[in-house]
């Protein structure tokens, strides 16, 4: 089963100093943090901030290639979690053909922003990941709230 998620923002992990993309479900009940590289975080941040580069960046290039080939990115799926690494694929449609292309989640998310394609996460990934179910118990919700409040606002980076 797939869970639709939305990119809610970027922040910096205060421990590792690595960027994190925050995904959240429509009702705001579950949150999934995905650590990404700085280059991919920059590509996501540029799109969030509507900053255009003078020349196409890699994700812009891929969007343009898909368009020129008559293909549409219909959705991004974060499909697996193995040994602490997330796996994703792009679901493309061209004419009557549906194609599935292996992708890193960070690249898939950057492309989804550029094409306005929805993002889905396999329920099994949510169950076995660092996802946070804010509905669980008041104590868990309070712990999450305390952690969020303890973050320095300068560390939160881009919010959507």
Image (tube, helix red, strand yellow):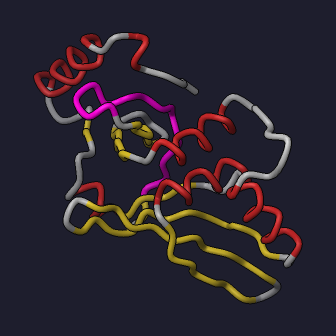
Residue 148 lies left or right of residue 4; in this view the side is left
Quarter of the image where one finds residue 16: top left
Vertical placement of residue 125 versus 150, above or below: below
Q: Quadrant of the N terminus?
A: bottom left
At x 55% / y 58%, what residue is drawn?
107
The residue lying toward the viewer, choosing from 40 and 125, is 40
Question: What is the chief secondary structure element of the magenta stretch?
Answer: strand
Residue 106: x and y in percent read 49, 54
Image spot of residue 38 (x, y percent): 47, 42
Query: In the picture provided, is 59 more to the left or to the right than 27?
Result: right
- Please state which of residues 34 and 137 is positioned toward the viewer in this rendering: 34
Q: Position of residue 54 (x, y in %)?
A: 85, 41
Residue pictured at 70% horizontal, 67% vertical: 73
Q: Which residue appears at 34% of the width and 62% of the height?
A: 86
Is residue 28 inside the magenta stretch?
no
Front-most of 85 and 149? 85
Q: Is residue 82 left or right of residue 113?
A: left
Q: Residue furthest left?
A: 139
In the rendered image, the quadrant that contains the C terminus is top right
Work out whether 81 lies above or below 49. Answer: below
Q: Which residues are magenta?
A: 3-17
Image check: 144 left or right of 72? left
* Number of on-image labels: 0
Residue 157, given in percent of the width and then of the height, sits at 49, 22
Residue 147 image-quadrant placement = top left
In terms of depth relative to the viewer, which is nearer, 81 or 138? Answer: 81
């Amino acid at each position: 089963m797939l869970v639709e998620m939305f990119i809610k923002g970027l922040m910096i992990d205060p421990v590792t100093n690595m960027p994190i993309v925050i995904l959240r479900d429509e009702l705001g009940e579950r949150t999934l943090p995905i650590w990404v590289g700085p280059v991919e975080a920059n590509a996501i941040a540029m799109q969030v901030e509507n900053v255009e580069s003078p020349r196409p960046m890699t994700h812009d290039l891929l969007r343009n290639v898909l368009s020129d080939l008559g293909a549409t990115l219909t959705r991004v799926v974060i499909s697996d979690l193995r040994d602490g690494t997330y796996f994703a694929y792009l679901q493309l449609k061209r004419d009557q053909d549906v194609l599935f292309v292996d992708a890193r989640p960070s690249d898939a998310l950057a492309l989804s922003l550029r094409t306005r394609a929805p993002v889905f996460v396999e329920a099994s990934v949510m169950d076995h990941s660092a996802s946070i179910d804010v509905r669980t118990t008041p104590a868990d919700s309070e712990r999450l709230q305390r952690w969020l409040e303890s973050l320095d606002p300068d560390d939160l980076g881009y919010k959507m």
